[in-house]
């Protein structure tokens, strides 16, 4: 923990120093040239000040890159990320619901309307602040029981504050990777924007599959890797937040795939996958 904290501090200092050097070149180094003229520190800074500005800027770019790679080796942990994000998550939701992934959400809502039958028991993997429960309610879908699970206590606290009063709903904490999923014979299992944080999505899908009723469905919405440079950039940036894009060869191995829809965006494409468990397993 302390080692990670120190790495983050070092990475952040390198990035800040590198960016300033990249932008201001010699002017920035000059600011550091202080103290006794004969001291080693002064002489080094004096020597640097006399280098051509472009060399200093290249050094700034290299230092920034070095800082970023140090930061990537000590990414923000999922719990810490959502501890902070829980405070503004709901305010920011329209950015991806109404703008970035509007088409993907329209298809997701359609799938919900198709597969939530009267009295259906629904399990939401990585429910966060309860966005999918809110959608079930807003769409007026006749679910019977909703169970939401999430790693982050702070995200769950927001969900419970908003929906704790709704009958037949329960939200609780667990780690999808390491904990058993709730037993339930669920009619529908959903998960939105969670697989980005899951090192082994197939493992989680296989666990969910076991809790699904014969004839039941799983609807998954997540960002996937594509060949575009934008998707590579997103994948790289997500690396700072213990997240990554799911690869096609990973999601193609999910059991019972009924449909896979890909929605291109300005960044990484969103993938909506629907799985169906056969009525009878022979
Ligand atoms: C981007 S949010 C999505 C929340 C919600 N599904 C939505 O659509 O708004 C990702 C959620 O996944 C949860 N999460 C990440 N890794 C998890 C894990 N291993 N087990 C359970 N939940 C996890 C996070 O705590 C966070 O609430």
Image (cartoon, rainbow, N blue to C red):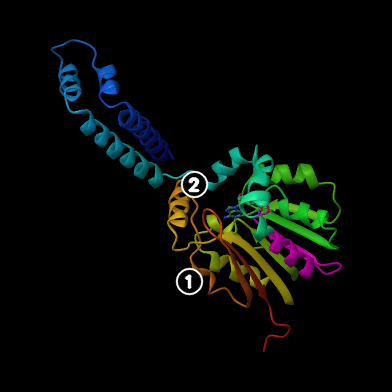
Within 10 Å of disc 1 (Cα), the crowding (few <14, some 14-19, many 20+) is few
Q: Quadrant of the N terminus?
A: top left
Is 124 magenta? The answer is yes
Count every numbered label the image shows and give the total. Answer: 2
Picture coordinates of residue 32, whole percent (x, y): 27, 19
Front position in the image: 162 or 28? 28
Residue picked out by circle 2: 241
Q: Secondary structure at mark 1?
A: helix
Residue picked out by circle 1: 249
Quadrant in which residue 254 is drawn: bottom right
In the picture, measured across the screen, residue 224 lies left or right of residue 111, that is left
In space, the residues marked 2 and 1 are separated at their CA atoms by 23 Å
Where is 189 relative to 56, above or below? below
Q: Quadrant of the C terminus?
A: bottom right
Q: Which residue is depicted at the point 82% across and 53% down?
A: 138
Q: Residue furthest left?
A: 38
Within 10 Å of disc 2 (Cα), the crowding (few <14, some 14-19, many 20+) is some
Residue 182 seen in render = no
Q: Secondary structure at mark 2?
A: helix
Picture coordinates of residue 228, whole percent (x, y): 45, 60
The stretch in magenta equals 106-127
Q: Residue furthest top?
A: 36
Q: Which residue is depicted at the point 73% across and 55% down?
A: 132
């Amino acid at each position: 923990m302390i080692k990670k904290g120190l790495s983050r501090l070092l990475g952040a200092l390198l990035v800040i120093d590198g960016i300033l050097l990249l932008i201001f070149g010699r002017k920035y180094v000059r600011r550091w040239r202080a103290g006794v003229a004969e001291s080693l520190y002064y002489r080094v800074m004096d020597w640097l000040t006399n280098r051509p500005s472009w060399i200093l800027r290249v050094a700034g770019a290299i230092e920034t890159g070095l800082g970023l790679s140090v930061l990537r080796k000590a990414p923000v942990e999922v719990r810490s990320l959502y501890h902070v994000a829980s405070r503004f998550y709901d305010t920011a939701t329209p950015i991806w619901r109404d703008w970035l992934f509007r088409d993907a959400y329209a298809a997701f809502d359609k799938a919900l309307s198709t597969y939530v039958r009267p009295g259906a028991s629904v399990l939401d993997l990585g429910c966060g602040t309860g966005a999918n429960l809110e959608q079930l309610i807003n769409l007026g879908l006749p679910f019977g029981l909703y169970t939401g699970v999430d790693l982050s206590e702070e995200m769950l606290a927001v969900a419970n504050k908003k929906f704790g009063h709704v009958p037949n709903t329960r939200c609780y904490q667990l780690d999808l990777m390491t904990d058993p999923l709730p037993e339930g014979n669920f009619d529908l299992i959903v998960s939105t924007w969670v697989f980005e944080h899951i090192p082994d999505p197939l493992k989680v899908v296989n666990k969910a599959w076991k809790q699904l009723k014969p004839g039941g469905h799983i609807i998954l919405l997540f960002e996937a890797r594509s060949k575009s440079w934008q998707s590579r950039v997103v994948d790289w940036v997500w690396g700072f937040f213990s997240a990554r894009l799911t690869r096609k060869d990973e999601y193609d191995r999910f059991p019972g795939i009924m449909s896979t829809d890909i929605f291109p965006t300005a960044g990484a494409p969103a993938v909506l996958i629907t799985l169906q468990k056969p009525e009878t397993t022979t």
